[in-house]
Amino acid sequence: MTLLLSINSAGDSWSPQRWRERFEQALPNHRIVVDGADAYAKTEVRYAAVWKPAPGLLAQFPNLAVTFNLGAGVDALLSDPALPDVPLVRVVNADLTRRMTEYVTLHVLLHHRRMPKLLRAQADKQWLAKDQSAASAVRVGIMGMGTLGRDAADVLRRIGFQVAGWSRSAKPETGVVIYSGANELAAFLARTDILVVLLPLTPATTGILDRRVFAGLARDGVLGAPVLINAGRGGLQIEADILAALDDGTLAAASLDVFETEPLPQMSRLWVHPNVIVTPHNAADSDPDAIAADVAAQVLAFERGDALRNVVARGAGY
Ligand code: NDP
Ligand code: OXD
């Protein structure tokens, strides 16, 4: 049985060699091949473990049984019109979840504790007067209460923030107030000072972060104006609307990890806007040690006849 690796991303954690070594350790009775580096027959490929493979690549393997996406979001794969109709499994992994919760907590706290303002004051050797509010005075709203949203909500709630979530379906078991569906979006936004976005990119969510959403956020909070934190996908946001909202004070600040075009083009004003924190789509990186072990366990379970976990519902797009 052959597992094919196809990875198109930069950085240490995306070195195909690192992934190959992890898979060879975890699946010693399988052949691991790296697309573009190894010779292999198209008919031998039974599993594909991929991150942003070239469109059309997966359609070339007639015996493909399962595609494993090596990240949580599957939008890049689902945009391939030739994606084979075999189960598509995405990452749900405690290591990835914890990394995202770190990012969300870090940025909520940065804005809550006015760190951008303090860093600017330090640059000017300015000793500012105290300007602090309790976490319990700040209303955080999380769009997307899936694996990642629920964990972040739990940590923020325990720090003391007033946390609510918004998702497609109601979720009684999350321990925070949940709003669901288009009908409850306005009420969710109206009680939100810091908007955290952990939605998947689907036809229903594309461009959802627009001027109407920003204008619907709470304007009576202790931060003065609302803050946007998007670590979901760049396609969720209209960047011209974010800049306009920052310029006219509809938004106080934004932390953005994802962008309409990645890498963020040099000419984008987001790079230099004083109230924007840009991170290079690194909120939660996929760790080969943690994730190859999960994928390998799923391969072995599948071969024993067990059901696959975390299979993407293609109709919903996530
Ligand atoms: P899940 O599939 O577990 O959760 C998705 C959540 O979004 C669910 O609560 C779902 O609602 C909700 N949702 C989906 N569509 C809609 C809609 N139309 N209206 C309202 N709510 C909707 O995903 P994860 O939590 O694992 O991951 C979320 C996203 O985070 C990924 O898709 C990816 O894009 C992004 N990500 C970014 C990373 C980064 O480094 N920046 C790293 C990892 C992930 P319901 O619960 O009702 O189904
Ligand atoms: C993911 C990501 O979806 O890294 O896992 O963006």
Image (spheres, rainbow, N blue to C red):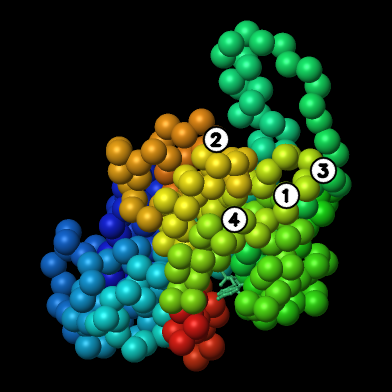
- Mark 2 is surrounded, within 10 Å at the Cα level, by few (under 14), some (14 to 19) or many (20 or more) other residues, namely some
Please state the horizontal and vertical placement of residue 312, each as a whole percent of the image: 48, 80
Q: Height in image: 258 above or below 222?
A: below
Please state the horizontal and vertical placement of residue 141, each as a whole percent of the image: 70, 58
Q: Which residue is mark 1?
A: 219
Quarter location, residue 172: bottom right
Q: Is residue 11 left or right of residue 37?
A: right
Of callouts 2 and 4, the N-terminal one:
4
Q: Which residue is mark 3?
A: 135
Q: Are marks 2 and 1 in contact (CB under 8 Å)?
A: no
Task: Identify the residue at image location x=80%, y=74%.
Answer: 173
- Mark 3 is surrounded, within 10 Å at the Cα level, by few (under 14), some (14 to 19) or many (20 or more) other residues, namely some
Please state the horizontal and vertical placement of residue 161, each as a whole percent of the image: 81, 50
Given residues 134 and 225, the one toward you in this image is: 225
Q: Height in image: 146 above or below 301?
A: above
Please state the horizontal and vertical placement of residue 180, each as a whole percent of the image: 69, 76
Indicate the amino acid at tag 3.
Answer: Ala
Indicate the amino acid at tag 4.
Answer: Phe
Of callouts 2 and 3, the N-terminal one:
3
Task: Identify the residue at image location x=73%, y=60%.
Answer: 190
Q: Report the disc number at residue 214.
A: 4
SS of the residue under disc 1:
loop
- Residue 140 can be seen in this image: no
Quarter of the displayed picture in which ligand 1 can be seen: bottom right
CA separation in Å, label 4 and label 3: 22 Å
